[in-house]
Image (cartoon, rainbow, N blue to C red):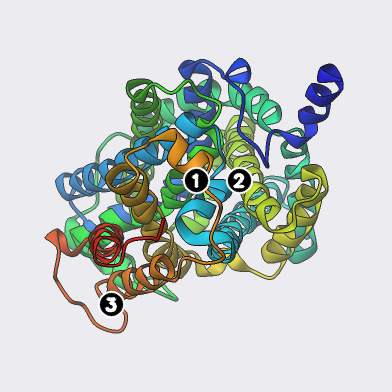
Amino acid sequence: MNKSREASQVLEDFSLESVPLTQRKTWLNLAVIWIGIAVVMSAIFRGMMIGLGLGKISSVVLSYVLGEIILIVMMGLTGYIGAKTGFSTPLIANFSFGRIGAIIISLSIALSLIGWFGVQAAFFARTIQFYFKTDFSLPFFSFLCGIVMMIPAIFGIRGLSALSWMASPFMIVIFLWGLIKMGFNFLPSETLVSLALSHEPDPYPLTLGAAASIVAGGFIVGAITSADIFRYARPRMKDIFLAATLAMLVSAFLHLVGSVLSMNTGVYHERLPELVIDSQYLGLGFIGFLVLLLAQWTTNDSNIYSSVLALNNIFQTKRWIVTIGAGVFASLFAAFGILERLELFLKILAVSIGPIGGIFICDYYLLRRLKAQAFREKTFSKANYKALGVYLISFLVGWTTSGNPFTIKVFPFSVFAFNGIISSIIFYYTVMKIFPEKE
């Protein structure tokens, strides 16, 4: 009976229950998965945007420090909740938001990750199209690439681990070589900023706070849903933070590669395949082509994996079936051109996903204080309207301080990704102390 149950979990991946301690993995194994997730072309994209927008390498590096610190703290704290409970993010959301609230939160996380999958699948298709100089129908080809990319995720954490171990070291070495080859011979700062202002449909970020928020927004979904992978970790906080720090150092390195590339050439992020492959720039040819494909694939399988965990909290059916359905839906996003709206997508992610993590952190560290029995045995409420109300207010704080529709400089550097997170922690703690839950 036990063997039959364990075999069924090969495809179900403990998506609706706690991961038993016997199934936990070493922190190094999980760190490699996270490094594979961090090796992603969107980090290069963000680095290119920031390099042109800020125009000075000192400001660029400072924006990385600010953005990555936010991500490390969020990854470490939410990841430890997963390790402590063994639960995925959607199951954790049940305790903080109630059953209906968790469905809403799960849906928002799933759509965010599906959107990222669509972005990566579309760029995957463009990379193949540029290398082979084909005239494929880009929408149809983007859809087809998405279908192919989802296959390893059907096998859960095992598929992710195998793909990450295979791809990550190779890609990091290649990117390091590209950085050395390009050097630090930057165009004049005025020229770079002018190019940033001229980018269409939206200018690149021109302030330190906006740049840091782009860094944080690019990985905020991964940080908030880090419990999905760290639930396989042994509950040791220092190990969780070490794995998170290693992954974010790799992410910062990739941002630096992107900034160096754009600051040397003045090339916009949409032309990245040309910049990596073409002899006019890096000239990596087939190796560059392979690097681009593997980097996108490792991250995209993480996107679909976490989105399926979120969706399974709603539909509660076989995980592999949900994976196929989500993969098809995400591939449609790629076909309909989500890549073209990347900057707006990043901004929405930064202000809409961060407050979810803020409420998790407040609930589990300040209110429940990580007492296992406080959430393992609790009966879920139908909906925690206090949590949902705080989430909405915190989203509005982040949105209005991001320059939409106007800029309000309330917090340091006006890092709007941070604004929504800290607001959610403060507001939720205050509300729950004034209106505590009934026993």
Q: Depth-wise, is mark 1 or mark 3 nearer the camera? A: 1
Q: Nearer the viewer, residue 196 or 172?
A: 172
Which of the two discs, 1 and 3, labels the residue nearer the N terminus?
Answer: 1
Residue sitting at 34 percent across and 23 percent down? 242
**Contact flag, marks 1 and 3 (Cβ < 8 Å):** no
Residue 205 at x, y percent in the picture? 29, 64
Per the image, the residue denoted by label 1 is 225
Residue sitting at 43 percent across and 46 percent down? 43
Say left or right for 393 vs 94: left
Residue type marked 2: Ser
- Disc 2 element: helix
> Hey, which residue is sitting farthest front in the picture?
439
Which of the two discs, 1 and 2, labels the residue nearer the N terminus?
Answer: 1
Residue 160 at x, y percent in the picture? 65, 31
Q: Nearer the viewer, residue 223 or 423?
A: 423
Query: Which label number is shown at residue 306?
Result: 2
Per the image, the residue denoted by label 3 is 400
Figure check: 257 above or below 99: above
Kindly report the distance in space between the C-alpha atoms of the residues bearing marks 1 and 2: 7 Å
Say left or right for 211 vs 228: left
- Disc 1 element: loop
Figure check: 118 above or below 399: above
Figure check: 264 above or below 243: below
Residue 44 at x, y percent in the picture? 43, 46
